[in-house]
Structure formats: C-alpha cells, structure tokens
Image (spheres, rainbow, N blue to C red):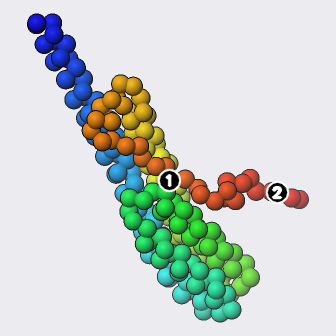
C-alpha cells in the first residue's frame, strides 16, 4: 500500500513538473510572438511616412504605393493569434516595400532625400529586428512543440489542452530562392 502511494505521489509530482514546463514553454512562445508583433507594428507605423515621402517624387508609381498601403492594412487586420496568416500577409508587405525601395533607383532626387534615407535606414533596422524576433519565436515554438509531441510529456499536454505552435515562416518560395549572380 505504501509503495502504491509512493508511486502515485512520484507520478503526481512528475505530472506537475511536466505541466509547469509546458506552461513555461507556452508563455515563452507567446512572449516571443509579442516581440514579433511589436516589430511588425513599428514597421507598419513607418509605412505611411515612407509612402508620403515617395509620393512626392514618384507620382506615376501610384499603383505600387496603393498596393503597399493595402497590404499594410491587410497585415494589420490579421488576428493576433494567426501566426501563419500574419506571416503570409507580412511576406507580401515585405515584397511590396522592396519594390518601393527599388523606386529610389529610378528617382535620383528621392534617393538623395534626407527624409527618405532616414526612413530607409529605419526600415532596414526594423527588418533586422523582425528577423531576430522571428528566430527567437521559432525557437520558442520549436521547444513547445517538442514538449507537446515527446513522450511522456505528450500525455500531460494532451490531457491539459496544450497544442503545437505554428512557425513564423517565409510563405513565398521566391523569397527562399538563391539569387542569381551574373558578372
């Protein structure tokens, strides 16, 4: 009888430890997602200033500028917990922002504009921070997913409703392609 109670006590303590580990991993994943969300918001806040600056120089590029605004609004409209949807929307916005940055090559006055250069530097900084935040989030998601899938922690995870977290990945295959370099 004492052995049975001891075994049950050990199992209960183990279940509590596993449960607490799962809670910690879930919280780390949510905190990491919050970091990505902050950086994406910073980038979205930069877009209107960038568009207004470019608009003065590139009046016949109206469709490109409208597309950036539309994609920014679409990305902002994705629910906070929809990692895959947000990744796809942000990927399209990144491509459109790349096209806006490429416009500077066609407009030397824009390329020399101090406000545009500052916005461009800020955008580059934010893009780097988004990349770091994405790596941190994906690492936290990986750790949670391993715990949710691994035996015996998966038994506790299943019984308490823990689920795997989605990764914040590049959705566009063209972004994954190795660029061609020609001399």
What residue is shown with label 1?
Answer: 168
Q: Secondary structure at mark 2?
A: loop
Residue 120 in view (yes/no): yes
Q: Position of residue 116 (x, y in %)?
A: 58, 80
Residue 70 is left or right of residue 180, and the answer is left
Q: Nearer the viewer, residue 22 or 50?
A: 22
Residue 27 is left or right of residue 1, and the answer is right
What residue is shown with label 2?
Answer: 181
Please give the name of the residue rendered at 24% of the width and 23% of the height, measured from the top-left corner: 14
Figure quadrant of the C terminus: bottom right
Disc ID at residue 141: none
Q: Is residue 123 above or below residue 109?
A: above
Whichever of labels 1 and 2 marks the residue nearer the N terminus, that label is 1
In the rendered image, the residue lying farthest to the left is: 2
Contact flag, marks 1 and 2 (Cβ < 8 Å): no
Q: Residues within 10 Å of mark 1 (few under 14, many from 20)?
A: many
Q: Is residue 89 above or below residue 110?
A: above
Please give the name of the residue rendered at 38% of the width and 58% of the height, measured from the top-left corner: 81
Residue 143 in view (yes/no): no
Q: Nearer the viewer, mark 1 or mark 2?
A: 1
């Amino acid at each position: 009888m004492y052995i049975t109670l001891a075994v049950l006590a050990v199992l209960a303590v183990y279940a509590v430890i596993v449960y607490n580990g799962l809670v910690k991993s879930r919280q780390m994943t949510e905190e990491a997602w919050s970091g990505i969300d902050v950086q994406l918001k910073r980038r979205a806040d930069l877009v209107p200033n960038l568009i207004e600056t470019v608009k003065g120089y590139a009046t016949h590029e109206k469709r490109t500028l409208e597309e950036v605004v539309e994609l920014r609004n679409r990305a902002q409209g994705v629910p906070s917990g929809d990692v895959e949807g947000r990744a796809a929307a942000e990927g399209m916005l990144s491509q459109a922002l790349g096209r806006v940055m490429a416009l500077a090559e066609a407009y030397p006055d824009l390329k020399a504009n101090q406000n545009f250069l500052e916005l461009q530097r800020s955008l580059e900084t934010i893009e780097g921070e988004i990349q770091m935040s994405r790596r941190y989030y994906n690492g936290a998601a990986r750790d949670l997913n391993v715990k949710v899938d691994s035996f015996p922690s998966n038994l506790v995870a299943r019984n308490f409703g823990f689920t795997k977290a989605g990764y914040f990945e590049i959705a566009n295959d063209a972004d994954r392609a190795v660029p061609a370099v020609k001399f």
